């Protein structure tokens, strides 16, 4: 397959991952913040870029964070919520222990709150950051659809729904199919492992 085709496949799969099936919500729009926070894209991109200069592991971690967020309860930033005395959150579920660099999203959100308070959702910040790291590391650019709402529910027990590393191909296909993703999406999204580490 030509390099451009591979890039396009990854792009469309990541778009699907972010919008298709994971949650019920109003239509997303690439221009969602055009009037209310036109600097949103710039602020996120700058924050992600600066972080990668000092923390070379952050691009891979942010991309994986997006996947782990979207696969559980949709792309609703529930992966960012901290555990409380009565609730162990997704962040502390076993597959997410090695997901780090949450500080990059926190940093972008802090800057966004100064520029346009109570406007940009954390879920959209993760989606933009994931796009930015793909583009920054030589992958394609795409216009991120925005307008996601942040979730308030986050349970570590849900993270058992993330695909563990020992699944065979059929099991992986089934896991993705439950979220409306096909075999091409599975293969293209697995290309994310071009970045980062694995034990
Ligand atoms: C197809 C099912 C998948 C499985 C079974 C899987 C499994 C894994 C495992 C076992 C690791 C290494 C974690 C560790 O050693 O602690 C890893 C890393 C990673 N995964 Fe996946 N993954 C899958 C899909 C995805 C998808 C769809 C994406 C993003 C679109 C993704 C992005 C990443 C990235 C970027 C890393 C490197 C993280 C880092 O360096 O910090 N993975 N994955």
Image: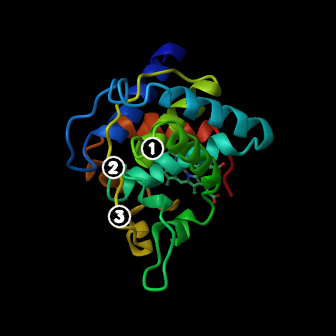
Which element carries disc 3, helix, strand or loop? loop
Residue 184, how many percent across, how many down?
36, 33
Q: Are marks 2 and 1 in contact (CB under 8 Å)?
A: no
Q: Which residue is labeled 1 in the image?
A: 117
| SS at mark 1 in the image | loop
Q: Residue at x 59, y 33 (%)?
A: 133
Alpha-carbon span between mark 1 and mark 3: 19 Å
Q: Could you classify mark 2 by the number of other residues whose Cα lies within 10 Å: few (under 14), some (14-19), or many (20 or more)?
A: some
**To which residue does mark 2 refer?**
176
Mark 1 crowd level (few <14, some 14–19, many ≥20, 10 Å Cα): few
Residue 48 lies, with reference to residue 106, above or below; the image says above
**Does the beta carbon of the residue at mark 1 sit less than 8 Å from ligand 1?**
no
Mark 3 crowdedness (10 Å alpha carbons): few <14, some 14-19, many ≥20:
few
Tell which residue pokes out farthest to the bottom in this image.
Answer: 86
Q: Which mark is residue 51?
A: none
Marked residue nearer the N-terminal end (2 or 3): 3
Would residue 61 be found to the left or right of residue 66 on screen?
right
Mark 1 or mark 3, which has the lower sequence index? Answer: 1
Q: Is mark 3 within 8 Å of ligand 1?
A: no
Q: Residue at x 38, y 64 (%)?
A: 161
Residue drawn at the location 43% of the way across and 67% of the way down: 159
Residue 12 to residue 16: above or below: above
Q: Is residue 163 visible?
A: no
Residue located at (53% from left, 65% from top): 95
Q: From the Cβ of disc 2, is ligand 1 less than 8 Å away? A: yes
Q: Which residue is mark 3?
A: 152
Residue 194 x %, y %:
62, 36
Q: Is residue 109 above or below residue 43?
A: below
């Amino acid at each position: 397959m030509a390099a451009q085709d591979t890039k396009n496949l990854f792009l469309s799969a990541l778009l699907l991952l972010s919008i298709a099936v994971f949650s019920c919500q109003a239509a997303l729009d690439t221009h969602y913040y055009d009037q209310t926070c036109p600097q949103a894209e710039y602020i996120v991109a700058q924050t992600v870029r600066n972080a990668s200069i000092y923390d070379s592991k952050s691009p891979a971690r942010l991309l994986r964070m997006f996947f782990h967020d979207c696969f559980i309860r949709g792309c609703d930033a529930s992966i960012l919520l901290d555990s409380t005395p009565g609730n162990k959150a997704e962040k502390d579920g076993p597959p997410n222990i090695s997901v780090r660099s949450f500080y990059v999203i926190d940093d972008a959100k802090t800057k966004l709150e100064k520029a346009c308070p109570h406007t940009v959702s954390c879920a959209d910040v993760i989606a933009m950051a994931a796009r930015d790291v793909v583009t920054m590391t030589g992958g394609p650019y795409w216009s991120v659809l925005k307008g996601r709402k942040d979730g308030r529910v986050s349970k570590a027990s849900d993270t058992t729904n993330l695909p563990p590393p020992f699944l065979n191909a059929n099991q992986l296909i089934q896991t993705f199919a439950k979220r409306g993703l096909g075999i091409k999406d599975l293969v293209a999204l697995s290309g994310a492992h071009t970045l980062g580490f694995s034990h």
